[in-house]
Amino acid sequence: MRGRCSSPGRNHLRPHVLSPSEVPGAVTLLEKWRKLREFRSEVQKLLENHRAAGEIGASLQAEVEIAANGEKLKFLQSLGDDLRFVLITSRATVSAAGSDAQSAIRALPSPHPKCERCWHWRADVGADPKHPGICGRCVLNLCGTGEPRQFA
């Protein structure tokens, strides 16, 4: 008598895991996310210093300003507004640094109120009188077409 796992027709439940070489563009994508995780680690260390100093509680309470140049500038700018989701901050901006010496990451506590729904600290919290405690992004997600997101 066969066990349940070896019965015919059960093989379809086995996952098929593809190697990166079997997926077009996977190697490039994996490298991109490796770089992003590495950069995010740098930002998280900076945020932890602010947390330890009592300037922020959670990372979403921070806004990050990044000055970079060369490939790093292009790489970070390629994510657009989605960079804040990767960094788990309420805002992330990227600008050109004049030189490598001027490259920097700066984190500041957000001056904006906190959205009751997504916990992001945003200037547009309460902008919709029908939804006074939430941000415009959440209003779009709940009552509109949803926010446009491309990468994260």
Image (tube, rainbow, N blue to C red):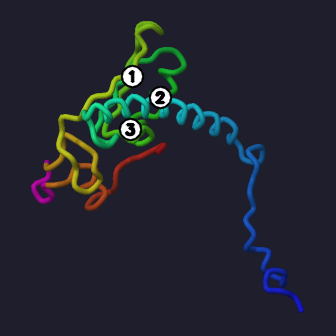
Q: Which residue is mark 1?
A: 105
Q: Considering the numbered disc 3 on the image, is that residue within a helix, a strand or a loop?
A: helix
Q: Nearer the viewer, mark 2 or mark 3?
A: 2
Query: Picture coordinates of residue 61 (x, y %)?
Result: 27, 40
Identify the amino acid type marked 3.
Arg
Identify the amino acid type marked 1.
Ile
Label 3 CA crowd tier, 10 Å (few <14, some 14–19, many 20+):
some
Q: Which residues are magenta?
A: 127-132
- Which label is found at residue 139? none
Position of 47 with respect to 32 (left or right) is left
Q: Is residue 109 above or below residue 23?
A: above
Marks 2 and 1 close (CB-CB < 8 Å)? yes
Q: Which residue is mark 2?
A: 42
Query: Does label 2 or label 1 sit earlier along the sequence?
Result: 2
Count of numbered tags: 3
Query: Picture coordinates of residue 30 (x, y %)?
Result: 64, 39
Q: Which residue is mark 3?
A: 84
Which sits in the foreground, 135 or 42?
42
Label 1 CA crowd tier, 10 Å (few <14, some 14–19, many 20+):
some
